[in-house]
Amino acid sequence: MFSRTFASNVGNKQQNIRSISTSMQTKFYEGQSVERYMDGAASGRTEELSLLLKGGVNIDMKNEKGWTALMFAARNGQIPTIKLLMENGCDVNLMNATGQTAVDIATFWNHKEAADLITKQLKDSRVEDNKQFVNYFGHSTLDRAAEKRKNTKWLKNTMENENTTFICFHGNSALVVPNTDTSLPKSVKFCLYHVQYSNIAKHLNTDPLVIFLGHEYNNEEKAWFAVDISSISKSVYTSWDKDLELLAAYPGGMMLRKEDASLLAQARALFAWHERYQFCATCGSPTVVEECGYKRRCQDKECKSQKGVHNTSYPRVDPVVIMLVESQDGKSCLLGRQKRFPHGMWSCLAGFVEPGETIEDACRREVFEESGIKVGYVEYHSCQPWPNPSQLMIGCLGRATSSKIQVSSILQTIVKQVDYEELEDAQWFSRETILQMLARQHKEKLFVPPEQAIAHTLIKHWVKMTNANL
Ligand SMILES: NC(=O)C1=CN([C@@H]2O[C@H](COP(=O)(O)OP(=O)(O)OC[C@H]3O[C@@H](n4cnc5c(N)ncnc54)[C@H](O)[C@@H]3O)[C@@H](O)[C@H]2O)C=CC1
Ligand SMILES: [Mg+2]
Ligand SMILES: [Mg+2]
Ligand SMILES: [Mg+2]
Ligand SMILES: [Zn+2]
């Protein structure tokens, strides 16, 4: 039903095949030339390969065993050749006749650097190929390197390393400096303050909460940590830099560069978890931090949580569905208003996923509870870590099977008693009205959430999907 959505979301895989048009280039398909191309890759003759690629060779051509040039380069750990092929857009996902990818081959032959390099591209290309939308707060550039979290020696050395960067948190807020880089979008008002541990260590508690965020891909030397500085007063941190200030993670986190925002989303969720889960959920004993911020272990050795793996010991992520619901005729979409929203703002309906519930059913239930609208087909669009404090917003598109809105239909009786309403109002909006709201040109000053919110992404996607001129 939503095939047009898929066309603009996940179905548009680029075929990255280069056609060869001239007769000279066509000759290249002859056996000898294939061999020359493959041999060039295996031997690392980058200049020759570069010329062949400029001549229009099919970069992903395969030999009779299904091997590509990238696979040959991976077989011999030819780093510059691998880089050249990837820069020229080779397909890193291809498999040979026995089902091995270039990463498998590099790994098998012990070329770790080559395997890591191709793996990184693989991740990037998945995003690129699928045209998958990455929302604000989701642009992490770090390898979380979970295996390092237990390696105390590596952690200690790395924390002290001058290439390592610390970001600082004080309760719910991050330490920031005003942005002075005018090349960044206007919405970027602040930058996370970056500091080395040695510069702040003397001001910290004896054992501050430190969280390992990860290191840059293929570079263990460039590691990132977050540290709790709540024991430090304003006069102390402003002595490091007079422009320093504390920025509340939400909504302040919307005013950062996208890379900073993802670091904030990761750190903020973990700090909030540590603050709220000081005691064991199973027996009530105090807990201690392990795995550089990624685990809390009960101090009672007899506690059930010590036996086996228990999710009470690990950081929380709360799944929330958020959905753009399209009317039966496809001409309008359903938006709602919560009381706490700024005047004039309308957004997608959203709600926490409940235990034992599918994403699709959660969308249908929340929409029905909040608006009385029934939803049939549901599909996934994209997601967003939401640091308020640790939701994972699962963005979906849904098709309504009814049209009569009854706000908080199911909750209405309870709502009266507890004086709380999920939504103050819900309405259908035409595409034309949505366009005015997106452009902030609506005559009654109605608008939708800012582009940092996944609600904005979904609304804009629906407008594009319905062929509006955006
Ligand atoms: N990024 C975005 O564009 C948007 C993000 N959101 C976020 O989604 C979240 C959920 O949306 P709502 O409409 O409020 O959900 P909702 O419709 O499920 O109602 C919230 C109520 O659900 C209950 N609840 C169930 N599980 C909960 C949990 N794990 N944590 C807290 N409360 C829980 C509480 O009674 C709460 O008052 C909100 O925290 C909001 O910050 C909401 C809309 C847009
Ligand atoms: Mg709800
Ligand atoms: Mg809701
Ligand atoms: Mg709910
Ligand atoms: Zn316990």
Image (spheres, rainbow, N blue to C red):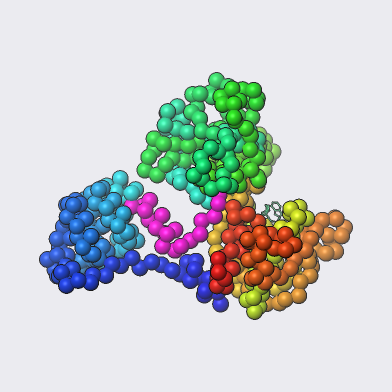
> Which residue is painted at 46% across and 46% down in the image?
141
Q: Is residue 392 visible?
A: no
101 to the left or right of 390: left
Q: What is the quadrant of residue 250 in the picture?
A: top right
Q: Which residues are magenta?
A: 118-137
Quick check: 69 above or below 234?
Answer: below
> Which residue is painted at 49% across and 24% down in the image?
198
Judged by its main secondary structure, the magenta piece is helix
> Which residue is painted at 59% across and 26% down in the image?
242
Residue 403: x %, y % from top left = 72, 76
Residue 360: x %, y % from top left = 61, 67
Residue 25: x %, y % from top left = 18, 68
Q: Quick one: 33 or 68, which is closer to the camera?
A: 33
119 in the magenta segment: yes
Q: Which corner quadrant holds the N terminus?
A: bottom right
- Pick out the residue farthest to the right: 417
Residue 382: x %, y % from top left = 54, 60
> Which residue is painted at 71% across and 61% down in the image?
446
Q: Is residue 16 visible?
A: yes
Total numbered badges shown on the rendered structure: 0
Q: What is the quadrant of residue 98 in the picture?
A: bottom left
Quick check: 77 above or below 375?
Answer: above
287 in the magenta segment: no
- Pick out the residue farthest to the bottom: 329
Q: Quick one: 143 or 48, which is closer to the camera?
A: 48
Q: Which corner quadrant holds the C terminus?
A: bottom right
Quick check: 225 above or below 413?
Answer: above
Q: Quick one: 238 or 2, which is closer to the camera?
A: 238
Quick check: 206 above or below 123?
Answer: above
